[in-house]
Image (tube, rainbow, N blue to C red):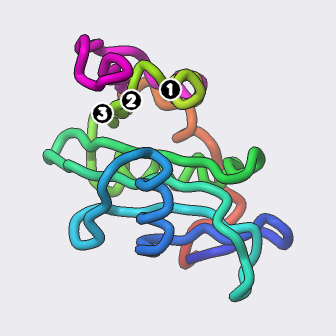
Amino acid sequence: DYSSRPGSGMIHFNNPEHGFAVTKAAGAPFDPDNDTVISRTDGTGPGSKLMGGFVYYDYTGVSICMHSAMFVPSWLNKELLWVSSAYPYYQLGCDSVFAELRSSNPKALDFVRRIGFKDEVTIPDVFPDGDLVVLRLRKAECKWLALKPRKAPNG
């Protein structure tokens, strides 16, 4: 866990409570033994609240899937964008990150598209309320890797 600057909250790694909250909001399961969580709270103390986060799952050696959820509008800052991009591409060596979303969730689709994901394939009638949309962000297209965090974790 680390805080990059005063007032920026705290970035957490592998907090299982955060993992369960993010995946519940995303309508997905969470496996604390295999999934990786990167999340942000509004403070550093015991009373701090979860602002949002990412859960990474199904690592294949060259790609990984991601769920995300926001609990407050200002949850995503430059540090979290960099850390959540550096993890799959630099630490794991992935070429691609995938997001699998319901077509009936336009807010989530808009969010992942705004952070750079592109539609890869749509599979019709996977859910009672719509299709499955698979989006991908390739390492070569990830602009967040160029960000320079104010302070690196453990640095």
Q: CA distance from mark 2 to mark 1?
A: 7 Å
137 lies left or right of 148: left
Mark 1: few, some, or many residues within 10 Å (few <14, many ≥20)? few
Location of residue 121 in the rendering, given as x and y in whole percent from the top left corner: 27, 13
Q: Amino acid at mark 1?
A: Asn
Task: Residue type at mark 3: give it.
Answer: Ser
Q: Identify which residue is drawn at 23% across, 39% down.
A: 63
| Disc 3 secondary structure class | strand
Q: What stretch of residues is rendered in magenta?
A: 112-137
Is most of the magenta stretch helix, strand or loop?
Answer: strand
**Of label 2 and label 3, which has the lower sequence position?**
3
**Residue identified by numbered label 1:** 105
Would you name the residue on which mark 2 appears?
101
Q: Are marks 2 and 1 in contact (CB under 8 Å)?
A: yes
Please state which of the two labelled residues, at mark 1 or mark 3, is closer to the viewer.
Answer: 1
Mark 2 Cα within 10 Å, few/some/many (few <14, many 20+)?
many
